[in-house]
Structure formats: C-alpha cells, structure tokens
Image: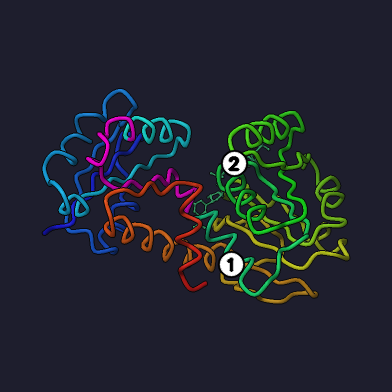
Amino acid sequence: MKKLLLHLDTDPVPSAFDQAVAYDSDVDNIIAYGNATRDNVTPHVHGMIFTRGGKKLKNSAIFIGGSNVAASELVGAAVKKAFFGPVRVSVMLDPNGSNTTAAAVARKVMNGYDITGKKVVIIGAGPVGQRSALYFLKEGAGEVVITSRSMARARVITDQMKEAYGVNVTPGESRSDESVAKLLKDAHVAIASGPAGVCILPKSAWTSSSTLEVVADVNAVPPLGVEGIEVMDNGTEKEGVSFYGAIALGNFKMKVHRGAISALFDSNDQFLDETTIYDIACKVDA
Ligand SMILES: NC(=O)c1ccc[n+]([C@@H]2O[C@H](COP(=O)([O-])OP(=O)(O)OC[C@H]3O[C@@H](n4cnc5c(N)ncnc54)[C@H](OP(=O)(O)O)[C@@H]3O)[C@@H](O)[C@H]2O)c1
C-alpha cells in the first residue's frame, strides 16, 4: 500500500524542503496544502483518517510545517482534535525545522560529552534555542541560560517555558559582546542559535572563558554565528574547545528529519513534536 503524507503548511506555499525530505524518506505521495490554519484543516484530516481503516491507517500520516511556529502548533492541536479515538494517523510537527534542528544540536553536542551538571548558555531565544534548552535539561545539565538582547524578552520566554514544560531556564541578556563574555565566564557549553548572517559570539568572548568546552552554531550564512568557527567543524578542537558548525549540524538534522518521517509509518498513533522528536534523534547515529 502506498505511503501517503498530508503536508499542512502555515505558509502560503508548502515548503519544497520538507517535501524533498519526505520523498527521501520513502514517502510515495504527498498531498500538500498551504495557508493551513486551525480553522481549515479538519476536512483534510478527515480525508486521511476515513480512507484507510484498521491496520492500513498506518500507511497515512500528517506533517505540519511553516515558518510561524506558534501558528503551526495551533494547527497541530486542531489536527489532534479532528481524530476520533483510534481513528487517527501519526503526525509530525516541525515548523521551520525547529524540532529536528534543536534535537540535532543537542545530540551532536552530547555525542561523547557528559552534560551532567554542566552550564549551557544558549545565545538566541528563538524556537531552535528554546527546544535545545529542553533537551539539555532533560539530559541533566546543571543550568541552562537562554539569552535575548532584551532581558525582559528573555524573562518572558523562560516564564513561558516554565508554564509549558515545567522547566527552570535562566534568562540572560546578550546585548553586547561584553555581556556575552560575562555569560560565558563560567559556562561549559555555548550554543549560537541566532538569526542567519549575524555573528553573535565573538572570538574575544569564547577565548576569555576558562571553563568553556563545547561551542555549536546553527547559522550557515556568513558571517557565521560564532567568530572563528567553520561550517564543517564536527567536534573540531580549537584552543581547547570543541566546535560544531552549521553544516555538520545540518547534515545530522537531515538524518533526524528523515528518521522521524520514516517512524511516522511504523504505527498510526504517534505525535512527533518538540517533546518526542528528540527521542527519535537519540536512535540516529550522531
Ligand atoms: N543548520 C540547520 O540545519 C538549521 C535549520 C533550521 C534553522 N537553522 C537556523 O537556526 C537559527 C535559529 O533559528 P530560530 O528560528 O530559532 O531563530 P530566530 O527566531 O529567527 O532568531 C533567534 C533569535 O535571534 C535574536 N536576533 C534576531 N536578530 C538579531 C540580531 N541582529 N542580533 C542578535 N540577535 C538577533 C532574536 O532574539 P532577540 O531579538 O530577543 O535578541 C531571536 O529570537 C537561524 O539562524 C536559522 O537559520 C538552521
């Protein structure tokens, strides 16, 4: 039976990237809709759950993407609501690649590195940074700091994370190179998860820390997020610190993304989101 993937994207045009990854994960056909909202997806979901009954349901699945993470999460909730008891299909939620990217960052950094009790500073409090924070805490990091150029914004985000996931993340302010250096003073791990094409971690900051052991950067667009890093760095040691660049992380992210799409077709009852995609990443060789 053909593997069918319903692709619901909150952007007007469904992502070509996400569709290409799905085909590379052995999906036979993709039924894609853009402009997905919580108010218009129910008929599409019914189209998937009412066409193949019983054990055959696992051959249909749903992918939810889009650049607006909050809107995509609302679509995820609407999809869940459209299911009837066991009449459901597996779902993967990966808006803007945030869940697969963060899972890849966390697994790469912790590949052969014991995070227990370590202090992690995540510069950039977008979806990738927030999800990475969850995974480091889950694995026993001692403290995770997440930063914004505005302390007030950082506080709003750490409060939201406390409410949504019950985790304690420390807010930090990264307005200047000096404030970044201060945050790294006693840190062991630094993650640059800022926007593409902006250097947010200068060399002066990471060389001034005597405790820093690992640095990772998700920005593949020059100037890179970390001064002195290279996109292909894959545990490369520089001045006593191990570096992971955006392409090395991206290559692993692709494996995690493909692994998650393949896993959708193992059964009809999975919901792969920020809390569960990490478990898939743990099964993929970093
Ligand atoms: N390698 C991969 O496979 C892969 C896959 C997906 C995404 N990515 C990359 O992951 C990164 C993070 O994605 P995201 O969606 O989490 O990020 P995002 O929400 O676009 O940005 C993260 C944070 O950066 C801060 N920021 C914005 N402009 C800034 C500036 N000029 N200087 C310093 N900070 C600035 C913002 O926080 P404040 O305004 O509060 O300071 C924002 O919350 C992006 O670079 C994206 O390209 C990589």
Label tally: 2
Query: Quick one: label 2 or label 1, which is nearer the N terminus?
Result: 1
- In the picture, measured across the screen, residue 33 lies left or right of residue 164, that is left
Residue segment shown in magenta: 80-100
Near-viewer residue (2 or 149) = 2
Tell me the mark number nearer the camera, choosing from 2 and 1: 1
Residue 204 percent across, percent down from the top left: 83, 59
- In the picture, measured across the screen, residue 186 lies left or right of residue 36, that is right
Q: Sort mark 1 into few (<14), some (14-19) or many (20+) by Cα contacts within 10 Å.
A: many
Residue at label 1?
108
Callout 2 secondary element: loop
- In the picture, measured across the screen, residue 100 lies left or right of residue 87, that is right
Q: Quadrant of residue 24?
A: bottom left
Residue 267 percent across, percent down from the top left: 28, 55
Q: Given the image, on which type of amino acid does mark 1 rest?
A: Lys
Residue contact at pointers 2 and 1, CB within 8 angstroms: no
Q: Quadrant of residue 26?
A: bottom left
Is residue 36 magenta-colored?
no
Residue 103 percent across, percent down from the top left: 53, 57
Q: Given the image, on which type of amino acid does mark 2 rest?
A: Gly
Which quadrant holds the N terminus?
bottom left
Residue 75 lies, with reference to residue 205, above or below; the image says: above
For residue 126, which numbered disc appears in the image?
A: 2
The reply to whether the residue tagged 2 has its Cβ within 8 angstroms of ligand 1 is yes
For residue 240, which numbered disc appears in the image?
A: none
Residue 168 lies, with reference to residue 250, above or below; the image says: above
Q: Sort mark 2 into few (<14), some (14-19) or many (20+) by Cα contacts within 10 Å.
A: some
Q: State which image quarter holds ligand 1.
A: top right
